[in-house]
Image: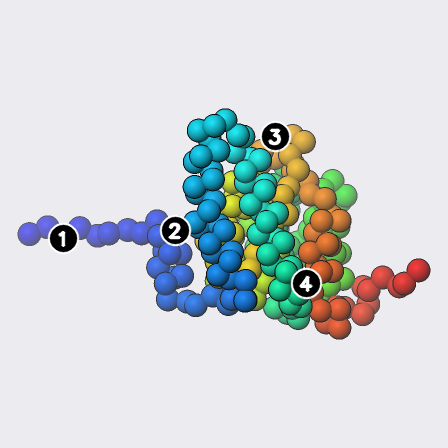
Amino acid sequence: MKCFKVCCSPQRKLIIMAEKIKLPRDDTAGRRNFLMNVLYPVCRTFGTVIGIEGEKIDDYFIRKNNRIITSSAKKYRSEEVLLVFPHCIQDWECPHRIARDIRNCHNCGKCLIPDLIELGDRYNVRMCVVGGGTAARRSVYDYMPNFVIAVACERDMISGIRDAVPLPLWGVLNERPNGPCRNTSVNLARVEEALSALVDGDSQNPEHVKPEE
């Protein structure tokens, strides 16, 4: 009798891991779960039928998810927060790989990675660069933060928010002047908006705090 070895895909392995590891939650977890895992699929399907552009629906639900998170008025210690950036923000031709260590950036000025590092350092939070949705999910289980701020496109953001529940994940959409997945950008003010609203000011790095004008 032949025996067959069953191989799990990376996605399946993360699902199994999620079943074993209990992710942190906040008091908005129930509302976010209903929004993203009940209302969103219905609205996405109905919207497609009546001709509403999918990205517009995604954008609405991402912004609604963010508003629900801020409604709790909860502040997180800097060590509880993880900033997640997509690798496509890095310059396409850059020879320095930063997926393993964001500090491997050589600050050449061709992309926004140095600015994002400076912003993360100012708020004293952990940061990582990921190569896709599976790597982003892996980073959550590796770092086990209580709160995530992620930069991504609409598709990856929606998937990430839904998979992260009950963990609160604030989404900042990237900008794609060169098309998808290549030399993308992000509005730094929107990233800082999330940091300033949800990171406890007492836990910021005093060496990077901007003086009051």
Tell me how the rendering is colored: rainbow
How many angstroms separate mark 3 from mark 2 (CA)? 27 Å
Q: Residues within 10 Å of mark 4 (few under 14, many from 20)?
A: many
Q: Which residue ends up furthest to the right in the rendered image?
A: 213
The residue that appears at 77% across and 43% down in the rendered structure is 109
Q: Residues within 10 Å of mark 2 (few under 14, many from 20)?
A: few
Q: Nearer the viewer, mark 3 or mark 4?
A: 4
Q: Nearer the viewer, mark 4 or mark 1?
A: 4
The residue that appears at 58% across and 35% down in the rendered structure is 56
Locate the C terminus by quadrant. bottom right
Secondary structure of the residue carrying tag 3 is loop
Q: Mark 1 sits on what residue?
A: 3
Q: Is residue 179 left or right of residue 192?
A: left
Q: Residues within 10 Å of mark 1 (few under 14, many from 20)?
A: few
Q: Earlier in the sequence, mark 2 or mark 4?
A: 2
The residue that appears at 61% across and 47% down in the rendered structure is 63
Residue type, numbered disc 2: Pro
